[in-house]
Image (tube, rainbow, N blue to C red):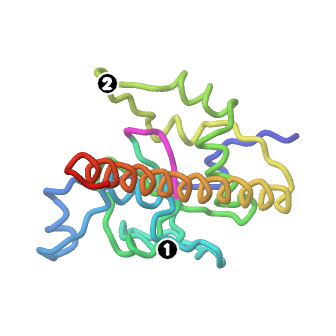
Amino acid sequence: MKKCKLKEFVTFVPGINQSRAATQFKSKTIKFYDQDSFNQDYHYKEVNMDGDLLNTSKSDDLSLDKGSVVISNSLNLATLVGESNVNKVLSLNFTKVEFNKKELDKRYFLYLFNVSKEIQRQKERKLQGSGPILRIPIKTLEDLDIPLIPLKEQEKIGKIYSEVLKLQGKLNRYSDLVEKMTHSILEESVRGGK
């Protein structure tokens, strides 16, 4: 298996300072990609990613397209942007991943970045900062060694990984609904119901 540096395939674009965004984008109404947006995308809430992923080309624009890959700097996790978060602008808490070559599948990247034990060990060794939130500098992200397998295999692994995430999201929502229904029934019983 061939090992390559991540920087051979992607470019990392840091988010911008929210106070400077109005000047840079010449607009007073800017929707920022925030932690709720990330959670929504990560847990596949209201997102349909069954079709082809859009290729996000290199640009100076920090607004997001459907299928853009975003890293949460505080969680050290990555996700694909869904339709409900299109055109939002990244704040400093996030980093956009732009793919320069078609030799690295986006979903395979997500698997590697979020789950692969080898990559997790590399990330843990490079964490920096003080306090509860540790971050990985962009330079360190660029130097992560990734296993490069044939593109067809990457696509299979990436598809399985994204399907597991979708299933987990559905199971979590189902669990929440069962809990709410149970609480509602119990409350009704306490109030003098049946």
Looking at the picture, how far across and down is residue 42, in whole percent?
Answer: 49, 55
Which quadrant holds residue 141?
Answer: top right
Q: Residue at x 46, y 26 (%)?
A: 127
Which quadrant holds residue 38?
Answer: bottom left
Q: Is residue 54 left or right of residue 41?
A: right
Indicate the secondary structure of the residue bearing disc 1: loop
Indicate the secondary structure of the residue bearing disc 2: loop
Label located before the other in sequence (2 or 1): 1
- Circle 2/circle 1 CB separation < 8 Å: no
Mark 2 sits on what residue? 132
Residue 75: in magenta span? yes
* Structural crowding at the residue carrying mark 2, measured as other residues with C-alpha within 10 Å and reported as few (<14), some (14–19) or many (≥20): few
Mark 1 sits on what residue? 66
Q: Is residue 43 left or right of residue 180?
A: right
For the N terminus, the quadrant is: top right
Looking at the picture, how far across and down is residue 65, in whole percent?
Answer: 46, 74
Q: Is residue 16 left or right of residue 27?
A: right
What's the residue type where badge 2 is placed? Answer: Pro
For the C terminus, the quadrant is: bottom left
Looking at the picture, how far across and down is residue 87, in whole percent?
Answer: 35, 75
Q: Residue at x 67, y 51 (%)?
A: 8
Camera-side residue of 50 and 77: 50
Q: Please give the range of residues in magenta.
A: 74-79
In the displayed structure, would residue 134 be above or below residue 59? above
